[in-house]
Image (tube, grey):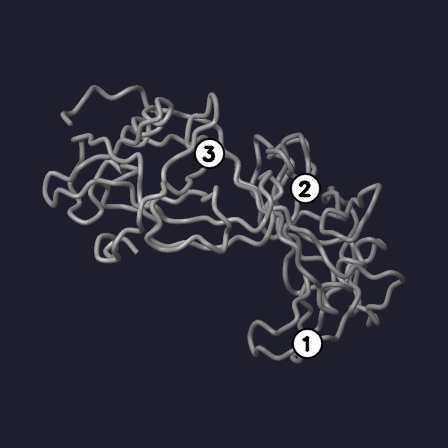
């Protein structure tokens, strides 16, 4: 198929999100539970240094450390950077400074936000104190932020602490999220536009003559640009597959189900898609499949068996 004028490249907002659940050991449990109780705990190393936030192993000697101590809620800014435009989920919704604060009694710095009227009000060496959140749950956000403090450094050694609290925090959920605008570029935009017409279009490398679906705009083997568009499929062959047994929150699909790599007829790169219309334990390598489109769908909902004999392994072994 000859080259055709490219439609405008697509752009769309995209959110990648992964809420990671982790359990806490005795040191981190004590630290986070302490924040809930308005207490800041550190851990003392074998050579007498106090680390805040605490860690379970000495970063220098790798020795396990459990000697908890309580430090002050006041400290000194060691370095800072001004944040002109706070983003969603950050500690404050007005401009603030990110600061490293060495709390009185600690030998390492804690990263958090400083509530200040402007960058001119922030300096290295300034004194600050913790501003506690009104509602505390046992998380680093129990420190709402730091605020300027006119008092002097509190003397004395950190006080030993057992780390024991009523109803200690045993686990946390860390919600990792990335918001950005994604543009698939010229080649994949053309591929997506073709899918909306229920066609699969790839691009052929002018050097090795391989056809890539989805197209990448360049041959990953030869490193040359690809512009010659080729329509492939719609049928294809299952080259390999996996059985999914864990239900995803954002997919209304009952488990178990099968996700497979499918080599469309005429393509030299396998794409992945869901297999349906057949019991999950009957899906196999070499199974011939075809796309199933839902009304108004911009891409195949799934692939189903065509009823053809299985493909010979030699016909797709290079794509496994």
Q: Nearer the viewer, mark 1 or mark 2?
A: 1
Instruction: State yes or no: discs 3 and 2 in contact (Cβ < 8 Å).
Output: no
Distance (Cα) linking label 1 and label 2 = 30 Å
Q: How far apart are the alpha carbons under marks 1 and 3?
A: 53 Å
Q: List the residue tagged with mark 3.
A: 301
Tell me residue 14's x, y (percent): 49, 33
Q: Circle 2: is it few (<14), some (14-19), or many (20+) Cα within 10 Å?
A: many
Q: Residues within 10 Å of mark 3 (few under 14, many from 20)?
A: some
Q: Nearer the viewer, residue 142 or 259?
A: 259
Which residue occupies the extreme right position in the image? 166
Residue 263 x, y percent position in the rendering: 30, 45
Q: Quadrant of the N terminus?
A: top left
Please determine whether, in this image, residue 145 is positioned above or below residue 167. above
* Image-based side of 49 in relation to 31, left or right: left
Residue under pointer 1: 65
**Among all residues in the image, which is located at the extreme left?**
207
């Amino acid at each position: 198929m000859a080259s055709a004028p490219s439609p405008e490249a697509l752009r769309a907002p995209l959110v990648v999100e992964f809420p990671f659940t982790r359990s806490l050991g005795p040191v981190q449990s004590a630290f986070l539970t302490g924040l809930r109780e308005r207490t800041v705990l550190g851990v003392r190393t074998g050579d007498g240094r106090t680390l805040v936030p605490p860690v379970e192993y000495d970063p220098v000697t790798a020795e396990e450390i459990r000697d908890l101590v309580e430090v002050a809620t006041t400290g000194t800014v060691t370095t800072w950077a001004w944040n002109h435009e706070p983003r969603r989920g950050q500690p404050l919704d007005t401009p603030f400074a990110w600061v490293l604060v060495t709390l009185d009694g600690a030998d390492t710095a804690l990263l958090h936000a400083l509530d200040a009227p402007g960058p001119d009000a922030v300096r290295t060496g300034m004194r600050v104190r913790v501003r506690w959140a009104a509602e505390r749950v046992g998380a680093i956000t129990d420190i709402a932020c730091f605020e300027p403090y006119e008092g002097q450094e509190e003397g004395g050694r950190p006080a030993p602490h057992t780390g024991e609290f009523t109803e200690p925090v045993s686990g946390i959920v860390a919600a990792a999220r990335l918001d950005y605008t994604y543009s698939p570029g010229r080649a994949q935009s053309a591929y997506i536009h073709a899918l909306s017409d229920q066609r699969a279009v790839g691009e052929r490398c002018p050097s090795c003559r391989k056809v890539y679906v989805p197209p990448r705009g360049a041959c990953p083997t030869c490193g040359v640009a690809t512009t010659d568009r080729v329509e492939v499929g719609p049928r294809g062959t299952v080259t390999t597959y996996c059985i999914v047994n864990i239900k995803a929150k954002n997919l209304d699909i009952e488990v178990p189900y099968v996700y497979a790599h499918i080599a469309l007829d005429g393509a030299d790169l396998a794409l992945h898609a869901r297999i349906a219309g057949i019991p999950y334990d009957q899906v196999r390598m070499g199974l011939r499949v075809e796309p199933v489109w839902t009304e108004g769908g911009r891409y195949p909902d799934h692939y189903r068996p065509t009823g053809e004999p299985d493909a010979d392994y030699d016909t797709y072994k290079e794509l496994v």
